[in-house]
Image (tube, helix red, strand yellow):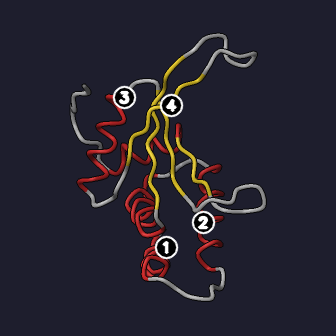
Amino acid sequence: MSVQRRPMNARDRAVWEDAEGSLWVPGETFIRGPHLKTSQMEREILVDYQAGAAKDGVVRYIYTRNAKKSLRTPRDYTFYETQIGGLAHIARQLRLTAPYRRSAKFAAQISKFKAYLALPRKQTYDCVTQARKLSRFF
């Protein structure tokens, strides 16, 4: 059972995402919908991360992942991963954390996400419209 210490504010989450996170956007090699992931060996930090995101209206999930012993990993271990899915939730998180971003790698991922939002679609859903409105601010 994980104990929540203190919910992270937008600045703390931005720093955490710059260091440990990645924004996945569909492209040539990645087919699933976009999502924002962070991972950590300790669950407590991610519980604080999730509580801060929920406080700001962003839906987040924590998953448990197991890595088996192989040539690349010398031992079995368990780590935890948070994930934001849905265009509107990703756009809201990026808007809240935009003023505190410093990583050039993450800035490139954000510009890729904006290009994905701008693609023409046969049918535009509400989540795409919301995400496009929010993307003007990050």
Image check: 42 left or right of 132? left
Image quarter where the N terminus lies is top left
**Contact flag, marks 4 and 2 (Cβ < 8 Å):** no
Residue at 34% over, 41% down: 49
Residue at 56% over, 88% down: 123
Look at mark 4 in the image and give the residue it sits on: 65
Front-most of residues 132 and 62:
62
Q: Secondary structure at mark 1?
A: helix
Location of residue 30 (image quadrant) = bottom right
In the displayed structure, 136 sits above or below 79; it is: below
Q: Where does the image place residue 54, in percent across and percent down from the top left?
A: 27, 53
- Return the disc, 3 or 1, that comes first in the chain's sequence: 3
Q: Amino acid at mark 4?
A: Arg
- Return the disc, 2 or 3, that comes first in the chain's sequence: 3
Q: Judge depth for marks 3 and 1 and give the one in front.
A: 3
Q: Where does the image place residue 125, in percent across and percent down from the top left?
A: 48, 83
Label 2 and label 1: CA atoms lie apart by 9 Å
How many labels, in total?
Answer: 4
In the displayed structure, 19 sits above or below 35; it is: above
